[in-house]
Image: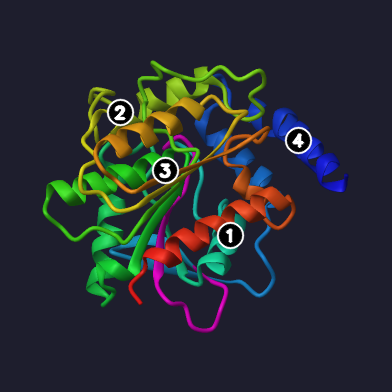
């Protein structure tokens, strides 16, 4: 009963506080400031440690929740490629660190419109390669991300594959944005977080002069063959539900080991409420299991 009340309260909070921020008329700098304040309600578990670091010259946060991390998760935050940071996602990455038993490295990749494609992808690749240079094998590295960061995670794996570079042990994506053309958005009865006009604007700012159908911008147009095991989590109350389902179908078509988990009556990147909402906590526990299952022993 209490969880149902909490779920309803959080949904209303997202609709009244977050969704208005993510409107096309709100200037990007103001969105960055306001969303940072909104994310303060997403809290990490107790005893997490956060360290400001630099990886390949890119500012990042290292998150740990135990004394002996068994591997590393490269986490790519969401925000439509225009907002968000490693700091806004401390709640989510803290719970993921605890669930996975890994250290989580979250780079502050460059954002559009100041830095359009391929800046974010270049920074993600540079961070991954730097982890390899630090002595981690690819089998000790997992890649995860939410929303735009979920799409960026898949694009990173595609680029690594195209270059013949070692691939991470697994991919985990929450509410992934994998089709920036928006040609097949889902229309839920209610969408507590996103506005299609905002994501349309963000897509254009990120792509710049590149076509939105470029597979490294919209991975749904690429080939998934050879990618590592993939876990997809998505809520039923979000316009990116079709993106998640299409990603699962395309990955399965190309013989990628794929699991999709659809959480009824939950919203875009509901995992930020881990530690508060039981189903969000359970979702991150499943993500942690997926990561652990594919790390090198």
**Residue 197, position in %: x, y?**
51, 17
Of circles 1 and 2, the one toward us is 1
Of circles 1 and 4, the one toward us is 1
**Residue 49, position in %: x, y?**
58, 73
Mark closer to the chain start, 4 or 3: 4
What residue did someone put label 2 on?
207
What residue did someone put label 1 on?
285
Helix, strand or loop at mark 3: helix
Q: Real-space Cα distance between discs 1 and 2?
A: 34 Å
Using the image, tell me which numbered label, if any, was put on residue 150: 3
Q: Is residue 188 left or right of residue 100?
A: right
Quarter of the image that includes the C terminus? bottom left
235 over 61 or under it: above or below: above
**Prevailing SS of the magenta stretch:** loop
Using the image, tell me which numbered label, if any, was put on residue 106: none
Q: Is residue 68 magenta?
A: yes
Helix, strand or loop at mark 2: helix
Helix, strand or loop at mark 1: helix
Mark closer to the chain start, 1 or 3: 3
Q: Is residue 234 magenta?
A: no
Of circles 3 and 2, the one toward us is 3
Q: Residues within 10 Å of mark 4 (few under 14, many from 20)?
A: some
Find the magenta span and give its range.
63-81
What residue did someone put label 4 on?
13
Mark 3 and mark 2 residues within 8 Å of each other at the beta carbon: no
Q: Residues within 10 Å of mark 1 (few under 14, many from 20)?
A: some
Quarter of the image that includes the N terminus? top right
Mark 1 and mark 2 residues within 8 Å of each other at the beta carbon: no
């Amino acid at each position: 009963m209490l969880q149902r009340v909490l779920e309803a309260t959080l949904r209303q909070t997202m609709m009244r506080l977050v969704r208005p921020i993510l409107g096309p008329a709100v200037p990007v700098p103001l969105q960055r400031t306001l969303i940072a304040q909104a994310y303060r309600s997403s809290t990490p578990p107790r005893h997490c440690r956060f360290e400001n670091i630099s990886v390949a010259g890119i500012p990042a946060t290292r998150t740990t929740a135990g004394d002996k991390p068994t591997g590393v998760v490269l986490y790519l935050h969401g925000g439509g490629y225009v907002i968000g940071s490693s700091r806004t996602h401390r709640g989510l990455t803290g719970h993921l660190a605890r669930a996975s038993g890994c250290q989580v490295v979250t780079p502050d990749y460059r954002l559009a419109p100041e830095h359009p494609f391929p800046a974010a992808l270049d920074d993600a690749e540079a961070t991954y390669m730097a982890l390899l240079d630090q002595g981690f094998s690819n089998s000790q590295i997992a890649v995860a991300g939410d929303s735009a960061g979920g799409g960026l995670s898949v694009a990173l794996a595609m680029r690594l594959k195209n270059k013949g570079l070692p691939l991470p042990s697994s991919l985990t994506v929450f509410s992934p944005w994998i089709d920036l053309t928006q040609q097949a958005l889902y229309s839920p009865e209610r969408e507590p977080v996103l506005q299609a006009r905002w994501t349309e604007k963000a897509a254009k700012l990120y792509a710049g002069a590149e076509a939105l159908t470029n597979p490294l911008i919209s991975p749904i147009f690429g080939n998934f063959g050879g990618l590592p095991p993939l876990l997809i989590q998505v809520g039923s109350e979000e316009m990116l539900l079709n993106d998640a389902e299409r990603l699962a179908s395309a990955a399965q078509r190309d013989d990628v080991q794929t699991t999709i988990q659809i959480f009824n009556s939950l919203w875009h990147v509901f995992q930020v409420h881990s530690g508060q909402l039981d189903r969000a906590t359970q979702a991150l526990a499943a993500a942690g299991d997926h990561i652990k299952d594919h790390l090198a022993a």
